[in-house]
Image (cartoon, rainbow, N blue to C red):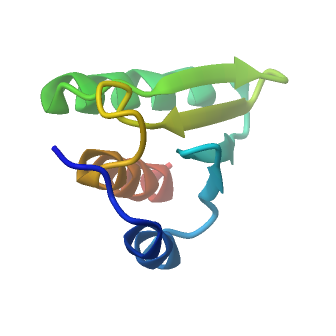
Amino acid sequence: MSLLTQDEIIRQLQVLSHWELIDNQIIRTFVFKNFIEAVRFVTHVAEMAEDLDHHPDILIHSWNNVTITLSTHSEGGLTEKDFKLAKLIKDLFEQF
């Protein structure tokens, strides 16, 4: 999978709301009503990531916040895989 250009990344980010580009990674923090919802969300993200064989960095903090960081480590930056998973995560969050 090849790295996306800066223009491609910007276009992809315009479609995804609330994701930020920081150091060749896209990052978003999700806020939940409680800790249990945050953990359930992480479990669903883990299952999706496993299905795609593309694993994000996930941080649960402040009891109800989940920060997801996506980058294709093997390529050294962002690829279509990152934005595919980001869209799935965004859609999942909208169901919570």
Residue 30 image position (x, y, % from top left): 65, 44
Asked whether, in this view, residue 47 is left or right of residue 53, the answer is right
The answer to which image quadrant residue 11 occupies is bottom left
Q: Give the left or right position of residue 63, taking residue 30 as reference.
A: right
Residue farthest along the right direction in this orientation:
62
Residue drawn at x 77%, y 21% as measured from the top left: 61
In the foreground, 84 or 47: 84
Count of labels in the image: 0
- Assign the N terminus to one quadrant of the image: top left
The residue located at (40%, 21%) in the rendering is: 43
Residue at the image position 17 percent from the left and 33 percent from the top: 52
The image shows residue 7, relative to residue 20, as above or below, that is below
Q: Residue at x 45, y 56 (%)?
A: 90
Q: Is residue 82 above or below residue 62?
A: below
User: Residue 12, relative to residue 27: is it above or below?
Assistant: below
Q: In the picture, residue 69 is in which quadrant?
A: top right
Specify whether 51 is left or right of 3.
left
Q: Residue 24 or 12: which is nearer the viewer? A: 24
Front-most of 53 and 7? 7
The picture places residue 89, in percent across and down from the top left corner, at 40, 47
Q: x and y percent of residue 8 in the render?
A: 37, 72
Q: What x and y, as percent, mark residue 33?
A: 73, 39
